[in-house]
Image (cartoon, helix red, strand yellow):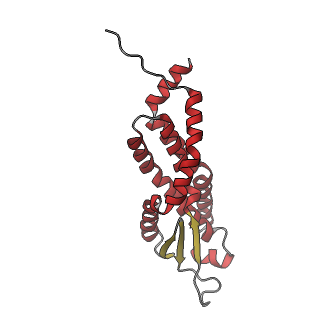
Amino acid sequence: MTRPAVARPSLLRFVLVALAWLPVTFVIWYFAAPLLLWPVRMLVTIIASAGFGDLVRSISADGATLSFLTTLKPGRIDTAGIVSVDVNMLLYAFGLPLFAALTLAAGGRRVRAMAIGYVALVPFMTWGVLADFLKNIAITSTPLIASQAGFGALQREMIAFAYQFGSLILPAVAPAIAWVLTHRHFLEQLRASVR
């Protein structure tokens, strides 16, 4: 008894299908961002309240932008007003449509792979948003505001590293790693077809 031939994936076909899915997944991601990024917003709120409660009064959302209302004053301590910092979550979530396009192009258990990938990417997006907020108050703000935040030189260096890592590395690399880990079987088939 012979087994039916299993169609091996083609690298060219995979690349073309992934490229075809990219515009679709980016449009869906852009318009569904408030819903897709809701878990990130919740995690950011929990972490900011627990770890930076002395700096953050509240966090509100307007679409994919989080507004951090701080306890910091825009000038001297006796100055009226408070500092607000806006962070665009889309900057740290652009890997979601990339992951989705690759998953759709690979076929197989798409829903399961997308759910696993999404859950795996939420902490990395959270990292980027929090690091952006901290960079804004500790590094790029005026010296008067930065001094109120109370971060030392070493802490500012750690914030700068976290921001760079969270904005340059994680948004692009984390989705690729998540995709590779959720599609090992497909990659083995693809490698076999290239031989």
As drawn, is 30 to the left or to the right of 153?
A: left
Q: Looking at the picture, does residue 138 appear above or below residue 124?
A: below
- Foreground pick, 58 / 4: 4
- Foreground pick, 122 / 146: 122
Q: Quadrant of residue 147?
A: bottom right
Is residue 95 at all visible to an observer of this figure? no
Q: Quadrant of the N terminus?
A: top left
As drawn, is 164 to the left or to the right of 189?
A: right
Q: Position of residue 60 (x, y in %)?
A: 49, 73
**Which residue appears farthest toward the left when viewing the image?**
1
As drawn, is 121 to the left or to the right of 23?
A: left
Q: Residue at x 51, y 20 (%)?
A: 192
**Which residue appears farthest toward the top when viewing the image?**
1
Q: Quadrant of the C terminus?
A: top right
Q: Position of residue 72 (x, y in %)?
A: 57, 80
Q: Quadrant of residue 87?
A: bottom right
Q: Position of residue 24 (x, y in %)?
A: 55, 48
Q: Residue at x 47, y 60 (%)?
A: 37
Q: Looking at the picture, does residue 17 appear above or below residue 66?
A: above
